[in-house]
Amino acid sequence: MADVNYYSVVESTHDVQNPTSEEKLRLVADYLEVSPGDRVLDVGSGRGWWNVELAARGADVTGLEINEDFAAAAVQRAEQAGAAVRTVVGPAAEFEPEAGAYDVVTCIGASFALDGYRPALGWMCGAVRDGGRIAIGEVHLDDGEPDEEVPSLVELVHIAEEHGVDVTGLVSASVDDWDRYESGRWANAHRWARDNPDHAQRQEILAQARANQSAYLTRTRGLLGWSILVGVVGGPNR
């Protein structure tokens, strides 16, 4: 019986793998001014919905994804859509983009793949051309109070500015977005456990799902925010 990855189970039906929506992501693409011929690099491309959306706007997209199940789903999605998307499987930190080679670089909820928000911004700014655009999705405190571990939204903006980014757009998650995202995870864990009663990891997957559900309901819901910052790197205003 093959081992399974927890996230491959709980996000097996998620097209949008963050607490946001297709409508909001299309707004992010509008803010990025993605145009035909743009070279786009996406970190943590997941199951590929975002990459196909960008390719539908005429961009040539490269997605980086470490989860083999997600990468396979992304490849299938791109093939079915006839989209100009290349999926690179492996750690994003091991991918070495040519400096300034991309018009747009995005990292929607995957800064952990580059060792956190600050390092991710530095990496992204190095990969994008002068005057290019970036979008990065990150968690933050929703009430603005200072915290040693989780920054406020204002702090996220200031850190971006320190990296030479002019923030030009913002799209934030609502509680409804969070509830929809988390509910999908709970339902997928329940469905997988129901359909795999004899799997060796059944109790492990269920225990992790229940722990994450409890953490969301007691410590995250209504307290933790999540936003996508869009900005221009360098250019005439810098």
Image (spheres, rainbow, N blue to C red):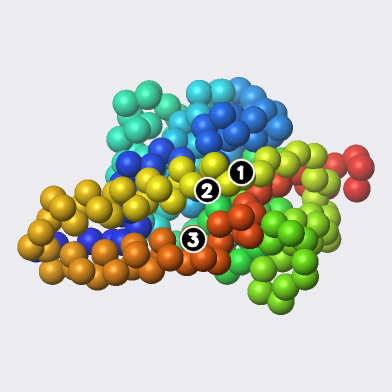
> Is label 2 in a helix, a strand or a loop?
helix
Q: Real-space Cα distance between discs 2 and 3?
A: 11 Å
* Dot label at residue 217: 3
Task: Confirm or deny contact between disc 2 and disc 3 (CB under 8 A).
Answer: no
- Amino acid on which disc 1 is placed: Ser
Residue 167 shown left or right of residue 21 in the figure: right
Q: Where 5 sits versus 231, above or below? A: below
Whether residue 201 is visible: yes
In the rendered structure, the answer to whether residue 160 lies left or right of residue 104 reads right
Residue at the far right: name it: 237
Q: Position of residue 57 (x, y in %)?
A: 56, 23
Question: Which residue is the extreme one toward the bottom?
Answer: 148
Considering depth in this image, is 92 or 203 the residue closer to the camera? 203
Q: Nearer the viewer, mark 1 or mark 3?
A: 3
Q: Name the residue: 61% across, 55% down.
A: 222
Residue occupying the point 61% across, 45% down: 173
How many angstroms separate mark 1 from mark 3 (CA)?
15 Å
- Across and down, in percent, residue 5 comes to 28, 61
- Name the quarter where the N terminus is drawn: bottom left
- Towards the viewer: 128 or 177: 177
Discs 1, 2 touching: Cβ within 8 Å: yes
Q: Residues within 10 Å of mark 1 (few under 14, many from 20)?
A: some
Residue at (52, 32) in percent of width and height: 22
Say which of 64 and 223 sits in front. Answer: 223
Read off the residue under disc 1: 174
Query: Under tag 1, what secondary structure?
Result: loop
Q: Position of residue 198 (x, y in %)?
A: 7, 62
On residue 178, the disc is: 2
N-terminal-most mark, 1 or 3 = 1
Judge left or right: residue 176 versus residue 161.
left
